[in-house]
Amino acid sequence: MENSMQTVSIFIIGGLFIVIILSNSIRVLREYERGVIFRLGRLIGGKGPGIIFLIPIVDRMVKVSLRTVVLDVPPQDVITKDNVSIKVNAVLYFRVIHPEKSVVEVENFLFATSQLSQTTLRSILGQSELDELLSQRDKINRELQKIIDEHTEPWGIKVSNVEVKQIDLPIEMQRAMAKQAEAERERRAKVVHAEGEFQASQKLSDAAAVISVNPIALQLRFLQTLTEVAADKNSTILFPVPIDLLEPFLDRTKKK
């Protein structure tokens, strides 16, 4: 009886031991996950997705996600090329292409990429003037993406996009830019007004040339003007009369 009880206990303990070994040996990785396997400290490669079998105690697996990571770059104090102090933040899109490199080549690729993006943001924006930052943001985004991608490539990371989100200007600079914009709008308004006056003078010159050929056209214009003025309820109408119309009356007076 005692021997049978001992046998049952041994089977139970052995079964539990096998279950523990299997639970530590079998891993399931999702479609977007990869497992970097180290055997006795040596890299043997990446595996997944699906079921992964590990040798207990001998193998160790580091799980890496291949999904795109959206990294928010904190606001950075930047002094532009024309000595304007601004605050700039950005967003970085990247993903792991080679899981083995992301584990072996760098200790923490998320932290390393974040620090690299901050320093690169300050360096690149510090080489540009304020007007360039505000008007050529697409060009700066492409330059940031190119530089960060070159530095993270040895880590097995691909930077797909970098976007400068917001540029915070000092209050004094905002006021100065508002005055500059207002002055620019006034300049454009004056230029448009001057162009209108120039075109109107050209048309008047053409009209004067036509009237000089046909003097009767001037009288017709006077009559038209009188018709337009008479449409309003005015008590007094001042209407210019050409001297030519009065010459016959003046001649009769002289003859008498």
Image (tube, rainbow, N blue to C red):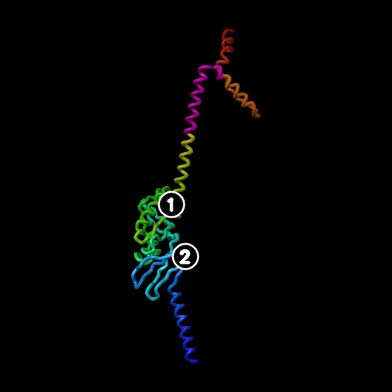
Give the residue type at disc 1: Met
Verify whether residue 128 appears in magenta. Answer: no
The region drawn magenta spans 194-218
Q: Residues within 10 Å of mark 2 (few under 14, many from 20)?
A: few
Q: Which residue is mark 2?
A: 30
Percent coordinates x, y for residue 163 in the rendering: 43, 54
Q: Residue at x 49, y 32 (%)?
A: 196
Q: Which residue is mark 1?
A: 173
**Residue nearest the observer in this picture, 76 or 223:** 76
In the rendered image, the quadrant that contains the C terminus is top right
Give the residue type at disc 2: Arg
Q: Residue at x 48, y 29 (%)?
A: 199
**Residue nearest the observer in this picture, 88 or 216:** 88
Q: Is residue 250 left or right of residue 112?
A: right
**Residue nearest the observer in this picture, 23 or 140:** 23
Percent coordinates x, y for residue 33 in the rendering: 44, 64
Q: Is residue 154 left or right of residue 68?
A: left
Above or below, comparing residue 87 to residue 11 in the picture? above
Indicate which label's residue lies in the foreground, 2 or 1. 2
Query: How far apart, in angstroms, are the residues tagged by discs 2 and 1?
Result: 51 Å
For marks 2 and 1, the one nearer the N-term is 2
Mark number displayed over residue 103: none
Quadrant position of residue 26? bottom left
Verify whether residue 198 appears in magenta. Answer: yes
Percent coordinates x, y for residue 137 in the rendering: 42, 50
Outermost residue toward the bottom?
A: 2
Q: Residue at x 43, y 73 (%)?
A: 25
Q: Residue at x 37, y 53 (%)?
A: 146
